[in-house]
Image (cartoon, grey):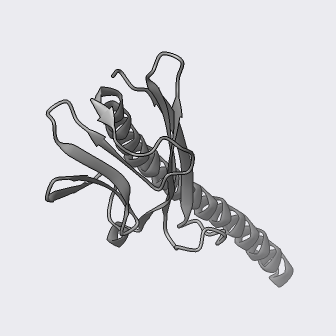
Amino acid sequence: MSKNQGFTLLELLITTSVTALLMLAISSLFITFLGSAYKTRLSQSLRESGTHAMNQMIEMLRNANEISSTCQDNLTEISMINSDGRSTIFKEDNDRIASISGEQTFYLTDSPSNNDYVRNLLFSCTPTDSGKKYLSVSFMLQTGNENIESNNAKNAFLEFHSGVVTRN
């Protein structure tokens, strides 16, 4: 008397279907994890780049001998006389923050070829009671597609705001 051993077609179909659903769920979680890790790396890179640029500007503005721009709100560039007597201008140039001293231009942020774009660089200047000036700096740094409304894992943006009272 031989007994038939094995799986029925229905058992194989159910097992295959459950395995496929589990693999689909696991791969979906893995893809979501990779996307969020990429977005986190973009945000960290933007934060480092923007913080570096902001710190450079704030330090130079704090130590400036004189702010030679007219003291008002919403300036798109600001010029100053440094402690060494040279003139420096901060402004947005080719989607980057430029520091222009004499004939040389230094960029404080990455180039658009690295998909980093500076938007809305604004300076505000307010005289204080002590005769010094309070300067505020704000800008937005984005990476990825130039269209900020695009909700894409490859796009990220951060806004930076800071202020400083001049020493002189």
Residue visible at 61% across and 68% down in the picture: 148
81 or 31: nearer the eye? 81
Q: Residue at x 59, y 60 (%)?
A: 30
Q: Quadrant of residue 19?
A: bottom right
> In this orientation, which residue lies closer to the viewer: 49 or 125?
125
* Residue 99 image position (x, y, % from top left): 28, 51
Q: Position of residue 153 (x, y in %)?
A: 58, 65
User: Is 27 displayed left or right of 66 in the figure?
Assistant: right
Q: Nearer the viewer, residue 111 or 45?
A: 111
Q: With respect to residue 153, does 45 lie above or below?
A: above
Residue extending furthest bottom? 9
Where in the figure is residue 34, as x and y percent of width and height? Answer: 54, 59
Quadrant assignment for the N terminus: bottom right
Q: Quadrant of the C terminus?
A: top left
How many callouts does the rendering have? 0
Q: Residue 63 falls in which quadrant of the image?
A: top left
Q: Residue furthest top?
A: 130
Residue 68 visible in the displayed image: yes
Using the rendered image of the protein, determine whether residue 1 is visible from the camera's viewpoint: no
Name which residue lies at 52% across and 23% down.
128
Horizontal arrangement in the rendering, residue 108 relative to residue 84 (left or right): right
Q: Residue at x 30, y 50 (%)?
A: 89
Q: Nearer the viewer, residue 139 or 22?
A: 139
Residue 28 located left or right of residue 107: right
- Where is residue 139? Give x, y as percent: 51, 51
Residue 35, compared with residue 139, is above or below; it is below
